[in-house]
Image (cartoon, rainbow, N blue to C red):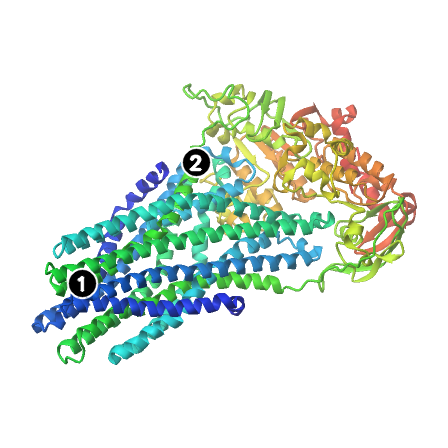
Amino acid sequence: MKQLKEIARAQKKQMYLLYVLALSIGVIVIGQTYFIVSIVDGVFLKSANMSDVLPSIVGLLMVLLARALFTYLNGRIGMKMASKAKLQFRQKLLSKYTKNPIQASLKGQSGEKVSIMMDAVDEVDSYYSKYYPQMIQTSVVPLIILGTAFYLNWVSGLIMIVTAPFIPIFMIIIGGATQKKSEAQLEKLAAFSGRFLDILQGLTTLKFFGRAKDKQEVIRQSSLQYRDATMDVLKVAFLSSLALEFISMLSIGLIALEVGLRLVVYQHLNFYTAFFVLILAPEFYNSLKELGSAFHAGRGSMGAAKKIIEELEMEEQPVIWGDKILNGGAQPPTIRLENIQFQYGETGFSLQNVSAEISPFAQIAIVGKSGSGKSTLLQVISGLLQPSRGRVNINGSDLLEYKESSWMDQLSYISQDPYLFSGTIRENISIGVKGETSQIELEAAAEKAGIASMIQELEHGYDTTIGEGGRGLSGGEKQRMAIARAFLKKPSVILFDEPTVGLDLQTEKILQESIYELSQSSTVITVAHRLHTIKNSDSILFISNGELVAQGTHDELTNSNSDYRDMVSLQRGDVG
Amino acid sequence: MKDLRLVIKLMMAEKKDVLLSILFGYLAGTAAVALFANSGYLISKAAVNPPLYILTVSIALLKLFSFTRALSKYGERFYSHRATFTKLSNLRVHFFEKLEPLAPRIFNRYRSGDLLSRIVGDVESLQNFFLRVYYPPIVMVIVFLSTIVFTSFFSVPIALILVFGLILTGFVVPLWFAMKQRGIQHQLREVRGALSTEVTEYHYGFRDLKLHQKLDSQEEQLLKASQSYVNEQEKYGLQAIYSQSINQTLSLMISWLILTIGALFVVEGQLDGVFLAMLVMISLTVFENSTPMASFPNHFEDSRRAAGRLFSVVDQKENESTLSPGNADNEDGELGALNVDQAWSLEVKNLSFGFPDEPRLALKNVSLKIPAGTKTAIVGPSGSGKSTLLYLLLKAYPEFRGDIILNGKSTHQLKAENIWEGTNVVLQSNHFFYGTIRENLLLASDDLSDGQLKKALEAVKLEDFSLDDPVLEKGENLSGGEKQRLAIARAMLKASHLWLLDEPTSSVDSLTEQFIYDQLFMEDEDTFVLISHRLKGLEKMDQIIVMENGGIVETGTFDELMRKRGYFYEMKQIEASIL
């Protein structure tokens, strides 16, 4: 994987250090062997005294300690590189996501994105902590051993050089075969392994049908089938290890045989050299084999990295804001929609030529069938979406010439499903407000939104923590939390996406009253689903198939537009 | 540990594979030691011009050990993995046996999806228990012991050093690190959780964060959490490398000690020099068996946690309600049974109920009466307690205050199985299993003919479905409406006489909905309880119960409620005014 390697290479200092360490470890392996052989040779054949071999014994101690230390350092550097890479990936993903326009977050892949940021990034770890340091070691250490072997006894060196390639070749051949085999089995495996979860998830259904006990056997059978399918794949992998083991064992055996024969029969070698080569040989093959297992670990990382990089390379058009300051002033800004056009993707749904003037303190209802583009229009007005043509004009300037925060500070957007963050109720209500909020202000806002009494009933009151996504609150309570946010923020423009289903009566009443009260001090633009809201608005934007087809008050539209009349009267006919 | 013992017990059911894994593991370990011992001996012997037959025998042995080593390793891997997967199968079955009686009670809390995937994941992660925790230490110990016995023939002190090395690298160091690792692992899980929360909030709350201009601060928090998570991971990883290095250092030191002492003995004439190389090779090789022990702490800790969590799920006693168990089942008393061939009446008296971990009561003092053979609708906004009431009727939560009476008998006196047998339940989300339409319908009863199944499909306007059509897990190849209709068909086939329907047609178009209800209500001897969010088509119901906030607001027929101009009337007005 090119990108992973580039990131590793970018950490130059660490990379060089790894090479230096690999080189040192190579030298240490030689040194270790040298000392061991010297000692054995000394006392065994040369009848040396302890004092003669003492320097070697001390030397061996040093070298062994150094080997452990360097192996540790090697792992440590890999670990540090992994940390850095993971941080970088998360940072890059985040800055990419932050720039994303809102439609990217609407594609409903939040779960996928969470898993990329958490799991995929974590999986990158083993490339740096295992594979990369091992790769550098394998590219250095065997070479040093090989060189030494050639220097001491070229025949052993030759055997190494001839047998060594079999290890990677076998790894590649068998690795490919395993992969093919496991891909063929994958579907089967997934089906078996999913069965247990499937049955657990259906346990309630099974119980109500009195069938739970029957499923025990199904679980056993599918587990055993899973086992057999997995073993089929594993067998290939184990056979490959067997082959590798054979290759390295036979090669070591070959070398042992060779030095043995040359030592005894031909007397080409002395004990010193023979023993030296004999200890070096396993080090040589082990180092090659270790790359195999590291490679296995690295392969998972590569898949994960591919996912991350695809995500990073996805093109999105960010909304670009200017830095003009929008002054709050005594009255809300004048909003003019000028020929607004918007399209999702190349061929997606589009909004066409919407023009309207919204004066300060106006109450505007956007009305239309579901899927007609009402919510899209609301998002364009909010600045979450950038129109592909035309513009939202605020007080005479394009909305996007303003500084993002200076517009958002004057805006409240109450969606159908407001998101509540994990934190206390206090934090959640005051989220839109800069600086400290007093308890009195907070309670006043909650009171107006009709949740004060509910909050007071809770043991910890405003300091009650509400969970991820505001679990534990009903739909109506969430709506009221959002209203409380607006009361506290006192925005000059309110965008309101009215719920499409009925809430409890209390919330319904509060919504009506609150919006009325908020409209006294701000412009309110509502995607309206309730007749009450529609009738009370100053002007209605009637949208059909992404186009603004009519504009006016309820009475005007009822008289002038038959589609509008049909839509509204269809509902009315149903009452009572 | 108690939980792991249970896992071991389940594992030992596969005695043959377990023993074979240990046997082959042992062969592989000793063969490697023998191989290197032999080559050390071979070389040394060769140096002193021995008779040729000794060399020939040694070389033959060399080959033998090589093959034994490689083949045994294969055998070890094969049998240990097969044992592991068989064990997982036993574990799943065992766990299912334990879990089955607890359903549906433990599932009906939010995040039950998490609970289930955690269970599946925990079972899965226990596969490392046998592979990495249970049998490697056994193999290690016997390989060491054999080696030590062998070594003692040449030099007892060197054998003792090996014993010392085994204790140190095989037990003391791993256990010591296992203890240290525990704290770090706990910390790691905490910071991972923190980061996961930040990431989730960031993505799911993206729009609200942007609107409130909080993206920057959320981003900052997220990066901070990411930093501390990565730091903690690093700490954890470094600790692991450290533990490995210490283990490696110690085993190298032991080899060093053996070499030094061996050399001393040779010099002093206590040991024949021809064995020195062999002993050194033995010591260098035998410690390869204790290297895997370095990762033992992590796997042990993981397995312990997984087993603990798994069994904590099934060990949960019934102390789950926030209400005192005023009148839970009288366990000793005989539980009676109702006749399932007749339609039951239903009565609820002063029922209060709260979910565990939630401060507010879900149902407050609810009383209602549903005569046998009548049709009742329960309506109200989301969160008003309608579905909870239904689950209580089904005895899914045995603990509540008040009483529920089916056909004159308190549910405390009835077996849950008996209640389920007498009811046709359609929940808001119904499960469909991997298989075919036929298999999923046959859940209702085994002795149904294809003709009957087809008729049921027609009654819910699914006549286009073939009985052999595949159904994927959770019915994910079916639309929401199709699943609802299939669930109704399945309930129809069950043909019991009390119907409990929770928003059964919320994703079905109104024409089909009407058709289905006409089919259902043909069984006019049956008792129907229909929970509904929408207020359409309730004119035919004998009784409408309006709920809000866990309590009943009003009760009556459609006409009565409309005339009363109360809560129901207002809800109806609002629904009618929604475009």
Label 2 marks which chain's residue?
A: B
Q: Identify residue type, mark 2.
A: Ser
Task: State the residue at coordinates (65%, 58%).
Answer: A95
Task: Please give the label number shown on residue B556.
Answer: none
Where, by quadrant of the figure, is residue A10 drawn? bottom right
| Residue A278 visible, this orientation | yes
Q: How many discs appear?
A: 2
Q: Is residue A527 left or right of residue A279?
A: right
User: In the rendered view, would you say B340 is above or below A7?
Assistant: above
Please state the horizontal and vertical placement of residue A294, each as a whole percent of the image.
40, 63
Q: Nearer the viewer, residue B24 or B57?
A: B57
Q: Which residue is mark 1?
A: A50
Element type where label 1 sits in the image: helix
User: In the rendered view, would you say B179 is above or below B327?
Assistant: below
Please state the horizontal and vertical placement of residue A430, each as a whole percent of the image.
72, 39
Q: Quadrant of the C terminus of chain A?
A: top right
| Residue A228 visible, this orientation | no
Task: State the residue at coordinates (7%, 72%).
Answer: B51
Q: Nearer the viewer, residue B484 or A456?
A: A456
Q: Is residue B235 left or right of residue A434?
A: left
User: In the rendered view, would you say B270 is above or below B331?
Assistant: below
Element type where label 2 sits in the image: helix
Please state the horizontal and vertical placement of residue B344, each as a whole percent of the image.
55, 24
Q: Which residue is mark 2?
A: B312
Which mark is in front, 2 or 1?
Answer: 1
User: In the rendered view, would you say A83 is above or below A213?
Assistant: below
The local crowd at label 2, few if under 14, some if 14 to 19, many if 20 or more residues have their Cα within 10 Å, is: few
Circles 2 and 1 on the same chain: no
